[in-house]
Image (cartoon, coloured by chain):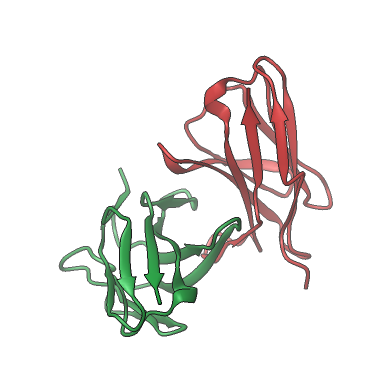
Chain colours: A red, B green
């Protein structure tokens, strides 16, 4: 099976712009979670989507949003970018059952905000 | 709330040295515990896990035992290799199903 793929791998944006990142989960997985990784805050949970519905949400402002399509692919959007949004954004997929503990991570999208 | 605390890095060892990376957690109940590894320029890979007290997770020579008495899940390896150089993250599953990570410990192994 192909692993989790994320596109693009690298992005450079300027303050005030918006950005959309994409994540394709492992075939058959219905849950996609997003995490932000920064040197200062470490790995922080953004949100989880399951069967096209947001099932869980972390403590991030409303500028961060996401969605999931019927084929389980997910996108996250960040509007009005700030310098502090520079980070590695990781997505992880899992089959989605509540008791399922193993998540598979993609390689990440490195976002730089200038 | 749930949280994970792991030892600050970086940790620098010589090849074949013994490795311990400490991890303690605060949680309601007994959540599943994990160690993830991140190699340079890559995403996270699950290294090992334990789902209940006294379970021992192991993989690629790494081991960690779920200790509820000390709320710990320390990572150990008897003989590290240069290829083990990476950042290691301890994590638990939060009450809503998301992973909660420690800050990460960077390991450098010198030949």
Q: Is residue B80 visible?
A: yes
Residue shown at the point (21%, 63%) measured from the top left: B71
Residue shown at the point (62%, 22%) measured from the top left: A63
Q: In the figure, residue A8 lies in which quadrant?
A: top right
Asked if residue A49 lies left or right of residue B101, the reply is: right
Q: Which quadrant is home to the C terminus of chain B?
A: bottom left
Q: Which quadrant is home to the N terminus of chain B?
A: top left
Q: Is residue A61 visible?
A: no
Residue at the right extreme, as displayed: A71
Asked if residue B94 lies left or right of residue A75, the reply is: left
Q: Is residue B54 above or below residue B89?
A: below
Front-most of A55 and A61?
A61
Residue shown at the point (72%, 46%) measured from the top left: A9
Give x and y (percent) for residue B92.
39, 58
Front-most of B67 and A2?
A2
Residue at the left extreme, as displayed: B69
Give x and y (percent) for residue B88.
41, 62
Q: Is residue A76 above or below residue B70?
A: above
Asked if residue B98 lies left or right of residue A22, the reply is: left
Front-most of A26 and A54?
A26
Give x and y (percent) for residue A33.
61, 48
């Amino acid at each position: 099976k192909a692993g989790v793929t994320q596109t693009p791998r690298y992005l450079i944006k300027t303050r005030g712009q918006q950005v959309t990142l994409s994540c394709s989960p492992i075939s058959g997985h219905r849950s996609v979670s997003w995490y932000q990784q920064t040197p200062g805050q470490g790995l922080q949970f953004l949100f989880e989507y399951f069967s096209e519905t947001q099932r869980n949400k972390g403590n991030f402002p409303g500028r961060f949003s996401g969605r999931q399509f019927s084929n389980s692919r997910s996108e996250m959007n960040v509007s009005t970018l700030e310098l502090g949004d520079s980070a590695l954004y990781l997505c992880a997929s899992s089959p989605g059952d509540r008791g399922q503990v193993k998540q598979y991570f993609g390689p990440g999208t490195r976002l730089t905000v200038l | 709330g749930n949280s994970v605390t792991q030892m600050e890095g970086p940790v620098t060892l010589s090849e074949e040295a013994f490795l311990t990376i400490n991890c303690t957690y605060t949680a309601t109940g007994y959540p599943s515990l994990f160690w993830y590894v991140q190699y340079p320029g890559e995403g996270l890979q699950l290294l090992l896990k334990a789902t209940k007290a006294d379970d021992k997770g192991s993989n690629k020579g790494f081991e960690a035992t779920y200790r509820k008495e000390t709320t710990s899940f320390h990572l150990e390896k008897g003989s590290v290799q240069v290829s083990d150089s990476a950042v290691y993250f301890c994590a638990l599953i939060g009450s809503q199903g998301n992973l909660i990570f420690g800050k990460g410990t960077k390991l450098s192994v010198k030949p």
